[in-house]
């Protein structure tokens, strides 16, 4: 069993990566957002604005500004990559 991971995870931890096709990638990203039921039910891109607003509100609960959250996102992407590579990883 595998899961969608950040692009550099297989390089950092090993495993058997494979690249997802467009439909697999879209489904895996949606699965990453399981708790965002409105987006999953509708599939509407405009619902992503609501997701972002929820993320900002959650960040604020941790005393993080949108800029602070972006800095954390950027640091993690620099360290482990993003999701643009469509990497599906099966740990060994």
Image (cartoon, grey):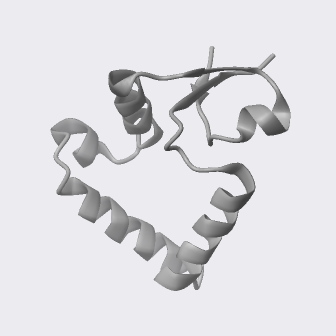
Does 60 sit above or below residue 54? below
| Residue 65 in view (yes/no) | no
Residue 18 picture location, percent across and down: 60, 19
Quadrant of residue 3 within the rendered picture: top right
Q: Nearer the viewer, residue 19 or 50?
A: 19
Residue 70 picture location, percent across and down: 54, 74
Count of marks overlaid on the render: 0
Residue 47 picture location, percent across and down: 21, 55
| Residue 75 in view (yes/no) | yes
Does 64 sit above or below residue 38? below
Residue at 25% in and 64% down: 49
Residue 69 picture location, percent across and down: 55, 75
- Figure quadrant of the C terminus: top right
Residue at 82% in and 27% down: 14
Residue at 37% in and 37% down: 30
> Taking 87 as reference, is 20 left or right?
left
Does 1 sit above or below residue 14? above
- Figure quadrant of the N terminus: top right
Residue at 29% in and 43% down: 37
> Taking 62 as reference, is 60 left or right?
left
């Amino acid at each position: 069993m595998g899961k969608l991971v950040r692009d550099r995870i297989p390089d950092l931890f090993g495993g058997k990566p494979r690249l997802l096709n467009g439909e697999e990638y879209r489904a895996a990203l949606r699965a990453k957002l399981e708790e965002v039921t409105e987006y999953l039910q509708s599939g509407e891109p405009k619902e992503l604005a609501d997701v972002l607003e929820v993320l900002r509100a959650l960040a604020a609960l941790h005393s993080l500004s949108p800029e602070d959250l972006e800095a954390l996102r950027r640091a993690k992407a620099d360290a482990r990559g993003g999701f643009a590579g469509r990497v599906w990883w099966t740990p060994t």
